[in-house]
Image: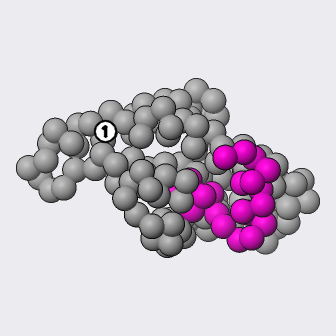
Amino acid sequence: MDKGNIAELFGRGQDCGQIVVEHFANKIGVSKEEANRMAAAFGGGLGVGETCGAVMGAMIVLGLKYGHNGPDDNERKGEMNEKRAEFLALWNEKYGKVRCEDLLGNNIGTQEGLTKILDEGLLFSFCPSLVDDAIKMLEKLA
């Protein structure tokens, strides 16, 4: 998926996490509709500038692909923990932070912050790069 397509999806109202999870829907055994619903609450860093939706979407993908199912599934839990650590290492190597507010320099969860983000064009330039990178990092892991 390229950044132009991602920006177009943002323009249609999809959020970072939704785009990431939808990209992997077939691979993780969910429909595109389910992918979008399960990631819907994570946009804008939970709507308050916290953890980036692209990172949250990546965690959903890794959980569905590698996640453990209860206390007796420690082998899968270990594998999932390794994949999560690998993703976060890749992400932190590139960005050094996971919070939307830190990545964007403004809190998307406030009107003032959102206005600045939109005025600077970050939602349609920088955010698609975050999503594209999250997808590329996941493709190495999932």
16 is within the stretch colored magenta:
yes
Instruction: Let me know if residue 115 is in the magenta part.
Output: no
Q: Which residue is mark 1?
A: 81
Main secondary-structure element of the magenta-colored stretch:
helix
| Residue 50 visible to the viewer | no
Q: Quadrant of residue 30?
A: bottom left
Spot occupied by residue 2 in the image (x, y as percentages of width and height): 72, 45
Q: Residues within 10 Å of mark 1 (few under 14, many from 20)?
A: some
**Count of labels in the image:** 1
Q: Is residue 37 visible?
A: yes
> Looking at the picture, how far across and down is residue 71, in whole percent?
11, 52
| Residue at x-position 75% and y-position 54% | 5
From what the image shows, is residue 115 above or below residue 95? below
Q: Residue at x 66, y 67 (%)?
A: 14
- Kindly identify the amino acid type of the residue bearing the numbered disc 1: Asn
The C terminus, quarter of image: top left
Q: How far across and how far down the image is residue 29, in percent? A: 37, 59
Circle 1: element type: helix
Please tell me which residue lies in front, 76 or 42.
Answer: 76
Dividing the picture into quadrants, the one containing residue 123 is bottom right
Viewer-closest of 111 and 8: 8
Side of 138 relative to 96 (left or right): left
Q: In this picture, which residue range is highlighted in magenta? A: 1-21
Q: Residue at x 67, y 46 (%)?
A: 1
Which is nearer the eye, 49 or 54? 54
- Please determine whether, in this image, residue 10 is positioned above or below residue 135: below
Percent coordinates x, y for residue 55 in the rendering = 53, 48
From the viewer's perspective, tell me whether residue 112 is left or right of residue 27.
right
